Every structure is written in C-alpha cells, then in structure tokens.
Image (spheres, grey):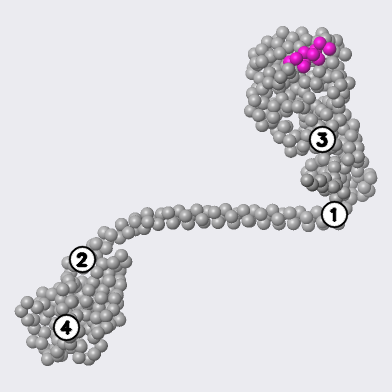
Amino acid sequence: MKIRRFFGKDMREALSQVKAELGSDAVIMSNRKVADGIELVAAYDKEPEAKLFTPKASPQAAAKTPGQKAVPSLSEIIGDDGPDSLKALLEKQHGGNNGVASPAQPNQPMTANAKHANEIASHLDFSEAFIDDVEAQQSSHEPVRQNAFPEHQASSMDDTSVTQSAELAQIKEELASLRDVLQYQVADLMEAKNKRQKPVHQYLITRLTDMGLSNALAKQLISYTPSHYNERDAWVYLLNLLANRINVTGNDILSAQGAVALVGPTGTGKTTTVAKLAARYAQKYGAESVAMITIDTYRIAAYEQLATYGKIIGCTVRKAQTSEELADLLFQLRHKRLVLIDTAGFSQRDSRLIKQIKQFDNGQMPNVKKYLVAQANTQYPALQRIIQAYDDIELSGCIFTKLDECYSLGEVLSAAVEYQLPVSYVTDGQKVPEDIKIAEAKSLVSAAAKLYKKYGLNHTSGNNAIKTA
C-alpha cells in the first residue's frame, strides 16, 4: 500500500491533488487543518486485487453488515467523469454516509491493507457540515494570521527598514563623495586648460591668492586684465584695480560732529583707538569739545583705563551701565562736538553682542554712528563671521588695527571689497595719538604687496624644517 500526504488551501484543492497523484481509487485515511490550509493522508493499493470497487460490481457485494458504515472511495467522492464542483462532491459524500450503496465489483474480496484503510476512513467525517465548518474556521483565522504576522515580525521589519535607510544614506554619501572628486578633477582639467591658454593670468591668480585675496575676488580682477599685458604690467594693473575697488571714507570721524561708537570683537584695540581719536580731536578743536563714554562693564578696569587717557587728554570721561544711562549721558553731553563711545568686546558668537548693539536702537537714543574695529591680522573666515554678525546694524565704516603685527593684508582688503565695507582709519602701534592714520586705498594695497614680497606666506614650501619631539 502506498500512503501519501497532500496539502491544499482548501478541501477541493487537496482532493484534486489526491486524484491527480493516486487516481480515483485512492482512500482518504485522515484529514486535519494546518496553518496553510488542509492536510490529507491518502492510501492506494497498487496490486490488482487491492481494488475495492470496479464498475461491474453488484449492489449485493457492497451491502452493509449490521453496525458497519459503508466507506466511500475517492472515485465516489470525486468521480472519474463527474462534476468537479465542491457541492457535487459533497453531495456524493453525503449520500454515501447516509447509507447509499456504491457500485462495487461482485465477489471481489478486499485485502488486509485495504480493509485496514477502510476501517480508518470509516471514522472520517466528510459531510457537508464538516467542510463548511472547516472553511468557516479558515476564514475566521485568516485575519488573525494576517494581523499576527506583522506583530510577530515587527522587530525584524523595523530592523530591515533601519538597515535599508542606513544603506541608502551610505549610498548618498558615496555619491556625494564621487561628485566632489569629479568636480575636483574637472576643475583641475579646466585649470590646466586655462594655464595652457592664458599662462600669465593663471600665474597672477596664484600671486593674488598668495597675497591673501580670496579666489573669487582674484578671478574677478583677472577678468578685467587685458590679455596682451605681460606679467609686470598686468601685476601693476591688478594692484591699481584693487585700490580702486577699496572704499575709503577719509577723515570722517575727526571732521564731523555727533556721537560715534566703536564696536567689534574683544582684543581688537577699541579702547586705545577711542583714546587716539579723542586725542587727535582735542588737538584740532580743544579738549573741551570731546568726551568719552564707556559701556564696557565686563572687563576689569575698563573705565579706569579710559579715565587715565581722559586725564592725559583733559577731556570728560563717563560710564554707562544701561541704555537709559547712556541716553541720559548723551543728552547731558549734547554740547560736545564729538562723543566717542567705547563698547565691550564680545565674540561674534556671543549672544550678549546682540543685546549690546540693541542699546543704540531703543527709540530714546540719538543717532549714533557705528564703526567696526577689526584686527588686520585676522583670518579671512573669521573676518567674514565678524562682518556678518553686524548685518543687522548700519556700519558707517571700519577701522583696521595692529597693522604692525601683520604678515599679510590681503585678507582684510578682500573682506572690505567683497562686503563693500568702507575703511576709515588704520592703526599700527600703541602710541597715543601718533599711531593712527587715515586710510588710503593705494597705501593699503602697496603695504599688502610689500608684505607679500617680503614674507611670501608660502606655507607649503619644502625648505621649512618640521620639528619633531
């Protein structure tokens, strides 16, 4: 006897598989519901004498004995040439269970295996009510399985989503890296092409950037240079062009009247610059015509330092801690020709800087001109951040200090040109009031060219020895 298991999503599919594999004479031994559908166990005797029924069987051979149920074969349930609908099959099965005898072969004895299979199959229930109940259970459990599946695998699905997101981010990062490399290669190819076509221009761009100018400003200046100029004539032309781009205000503070405030980061020399301007103004108009006010309440001895300068100059010095006090002092000193205000120095990232700047715009304050004080040896990115920190206020000009400590002036000149910031004064020492000068564009460019010629600032030079521990 041959026994096989068959699986189907419903009873019809399982019975069709039994019929296709074992034929119509197979005997159903057991059935049970599994996770994916129905499982059937079917048996089939390959020997000729094991055939339970033949088309020529007489009704008397298939008669039931008392207390024994008639076992329908698969051919009776499905039928070799009958309809394949589940309803027809169930009707056949229901009729067999109700005692309707199936045609069988007369005088055909059953083998022991076939009898055993029939005894097992006699206890199986293939009634229409049973199959309806199985299908109802499948339909009721199917949503549960559909809902239980995501819950069971929720963590794995989340892990898969996170993994896919990480992989996608990695792919984007690699693409961005490849794009940067390609842009660099293309830029290198374009630069090589320009060097071949315009070698003088490329050489001058290198000199301008080494002098401290930004690459964008250097290329802009080169674009206005005539192509037929040689290297020397083009260099002189570029320096003159740069000087024409620098906006200077002249002696505007010392020749005007009103209130002037010097703002800027810490350590730029605002207090010393205020003293220099006050001393120059006192020399021109008299000590009684100028006054100094400090609102620097953070630095130790800030007021004492300014008061010492006031005693030397002979002018009035006051201190204000709030915007109201500052407004009152400006009103009291309104008869002075010039009032210089020394502010506290903060980093451009310090929130107190904005609070201090807002003191000049509270509605009660008279018009105060504001000048930015910056060190001439400041790095170009730091200069950009400093100027951007004062975007919300109107700057009348700027003062570059500590020129005597510089090895390059191109950075401050580039920032002044690109941000269209007027340059008023420059300082080059600690002496009061000698070390302050009116800014002149040609003098600044000439000083920058001399510093470049003297120091070069070639940081990648191979002659520089590297000290090791």
Q: Name the element at disc 2.
A: helix
The structure residue drawn at horizontal position 19% and vertical position 80%, both measured from the top left corner, is 117
Mark 4 vs mark 3, CA separation in Å? 110 Å
Point out the tag, 1 or 4, that comes first from the N-terminus.
4
* Labelled pair 2, 4 in contact (Cβ < 8 Å): no
- Name the amino acid, label 2: Asp
- The first of marks 2 and 4 along the sequence is 4
Question: Marks 4 and 3: which is nearer the front?
Answer: 4
Q: Secondary structure at mark 1?
A: helix
Q: Earlier in the sequence, mark 2 or mark 3?
A: 2
The image position of residue 290, as x and y in percent, is: 80, 12
Q: State the image coordinates of residue 189 (x, y, percent, origin top left).
A: 78, 57
Q: Which residue is mark 4?
A: 115
Residue 195 is marked as: 1
Picture quadrant where residue 448 is located: top right
Q: Is residue 240 magenta?
A: no
> Secondary structure under badge 4?
helix
Splitting the image into 4 quarters, where does residue 237 fall?
A: top right
> What residue range appears in magenta?
303-312
